[in-house]
Image (cartoon, rainbow, N blue to C red):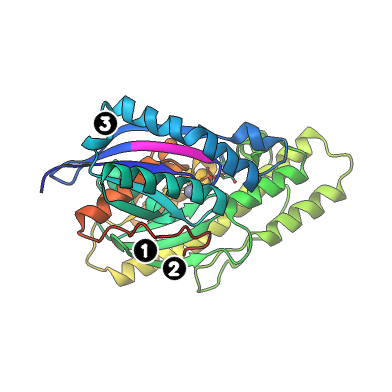
């Protein structure tokens, strides 16, 4: 097979993104161009993503971003082999914008269209960045998802665990809000925690000790609220201590949950001598989380793979790559009638 080049589009949440990615004949991936426009400023005054504002911002930005991705890659539409656009899960307005744009471009240029599952984009990124071979485990931790997934092949996934309430990023964001820290909460909590005492508050570690691999974070948020309201007024040091204790509780929870996942992987693939855990999603930027996962992986003989932050958070290169993987695997492209899906496991 020869090399393949694809245009990718991502609009499922609050990042508008376009990218051109190449798959060389030997299977190696190369990001040729990758542009992302974050809508953070449009949403920060509201303390969260506002779907209608997001959809409008995607409409305004996407054409320009696609042109820029192609220009930076130095290619015309005719030199692209296919178009990949996120079709779900996510906010329906943004998905409509991206998928319709992808269809229009594919139709006009006479190229096949791949309607990509956003989570599949996250799942396959480590093959683009690290050439990772199947099977491996992925922990996806973002504002919308907390999942432990077995990645067996292209289009072949087993979800081993998911959150039964809040996503991990959501827990960070809500905790920040409770403490009066700015949005997005994750980076603010991490920063405050640096000068805090992680042992001051004994916060709950939900589901620790249970055999199933699910997660739960809403009880932790409630405990943070109780700790915060018990001390009034809150000093900067109190806030730092709560943040540090919150991260400590998360570390302990993840160690238990993910540790069980690694053990299950070992049982499933006893012959696998280089097992790997990949992390993805915005929360993967957190240094305490990274250190925890690194330590856990070392203890279990797993390699820990953390793609660059830029590729852990939402981007179009991962959508392009997922499209390329589907193409290379000989999976069929999607009909022009394919519709976006706000929910798509
Ligand atoms: O993947 P992402 O950029 O967007 C989606 O959710 O799709 O993830 C954003 C989430 C937010 O909840 C944000 O607070 C969290 O990732 N986050 C962090 C950090 N940086 C971003 N959480 C903890 N520590 C961080 N340093
Ligand atoms: Zn994402």
What secondary structure do most residues of the magenta stretch adopt? strand
Q: Tag 3, which secondary structure?
A: loop
* Image position, residue 250 (x, y; %): 59, 53
Q: Are marks 1 and 2 in contact (CB under 8 Å)?
A: yes
Magenta run includes residue 203:
no
Residue 160 image label: 2
Horizontal side of residue 266 vs 254, given as left or right: left
* Image position, residue 92 (x, y; %): 55, 54
Residue named by callout 3 = 76
Classed neighbour count for the residue bearing mark 1: other residues with Cα under 10 Å, few (<14), some (14–19), many (≥20)? many
Horizontal side of residue 314 vs 53, given as left or right: left
The boundaries of the magenta stretch are 15-19
Q: CA distance from mark 2 to mark 3?
A: 42 Å
Point out the tag, 3 or 1, that comes first from the N-terminus: 3
Task: Identify the residue at image location x=22%, y=43%.
Answer: 81
Classed neighbour count for the residue bearing mark 2: other residues with Cα under 10 Å, few (<14), some (14–19), many (≥20)? some
Q: Are marks 2 and 3 in contact (CB under 8 Å)?
A: no
Res 20 visible: yes
Horizontal side of residue 12 vs 48, given as left or right: left
Residue farthest along the right direction in this orientation = 232
Picture layout, residue 1 above or below residue 15: below
Q: Quadrant of residue 252?
A: bottom right
Q: CA distance from mark 1 to mark 2?
A: 7 Å
Residue farthest along the bottom direction in this orientation = 211
Q: Tag 2, which secondary structure?
A: strand
Residue 150 image label: 1
* Viewer-side residue, 103 vs 259: 103
Q: Quadrant of residue 311?
A: top left
Task: Identify the residue at image location x=80%, y=51%.
Answer: 227
């Amino acid at each position: 097979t020869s090399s393949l080049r694809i245009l990718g589009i991502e609009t499922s949440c609050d990042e508008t993104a376009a990218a051109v990615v190449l798959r060389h004949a030997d299977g190696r991936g190369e990001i040729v161009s990758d542009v992302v426009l974050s809508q953070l400023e449009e949403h920060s005054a509201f303390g969260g993503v506002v779907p209608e504002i997001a959809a409008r911002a995607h409409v305004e930005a996407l054409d320009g971003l696609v042109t820029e991705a192609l220009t930076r890659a130095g290619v015309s539409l005719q030199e692209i082999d296919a178009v990949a656009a996120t079709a779900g899960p996510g906010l329906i307005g943004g998905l409509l914008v991206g998928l319709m744009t992808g269809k229009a471009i594919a139709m006009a240029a006479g190229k096949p269209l791949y309607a990509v599952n956003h989570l599949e984009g996250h799942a396959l990124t480590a093959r683009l960045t690290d050439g990772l071979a199947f099977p491996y485990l992925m922990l996806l931790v973002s504002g919308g998802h907390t999942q432990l997934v077995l990645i067996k092949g292209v289009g072949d996934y087993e979800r081993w665990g998911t959150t039964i309430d809040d996503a991990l990023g959501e827990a960070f964001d809500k905790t920040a809000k409770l403490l009066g820290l700015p949005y997005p909460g994750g980076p603010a909590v991490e920063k405050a925690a640096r000068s805090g005492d992680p042992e001051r508050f004994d916060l709950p570690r939900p589901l620790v000790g249970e055999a199933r691999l699910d997660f739960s974070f809403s009880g932790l948020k409630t405990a943070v609220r109780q700790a915060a309201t018990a001390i009034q007024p809150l000093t900067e040091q109190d806030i730092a201590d709560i943040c540090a204790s919150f991260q400590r509780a998360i570390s302990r929870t993840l160690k238990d949950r993910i540790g069980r996942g690694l053990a299950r992987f070992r049982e499933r693939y006893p012959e696998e001598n280089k097992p790997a855990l990949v992390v993805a999603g915005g929360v993967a930027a957190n240094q305490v989380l990274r250190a925890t996962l690194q330590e856990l992986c070392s203890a279990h003989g797993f390699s820990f793979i953390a793609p660059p932050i830029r590729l852990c958070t939402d981007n179009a290169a991962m959508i392009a790559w997922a499209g390329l993987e589907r193409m290379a695997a000989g999976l069929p492209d999607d009909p022009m009638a394919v519709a976006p899906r706000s929910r798509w496991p």
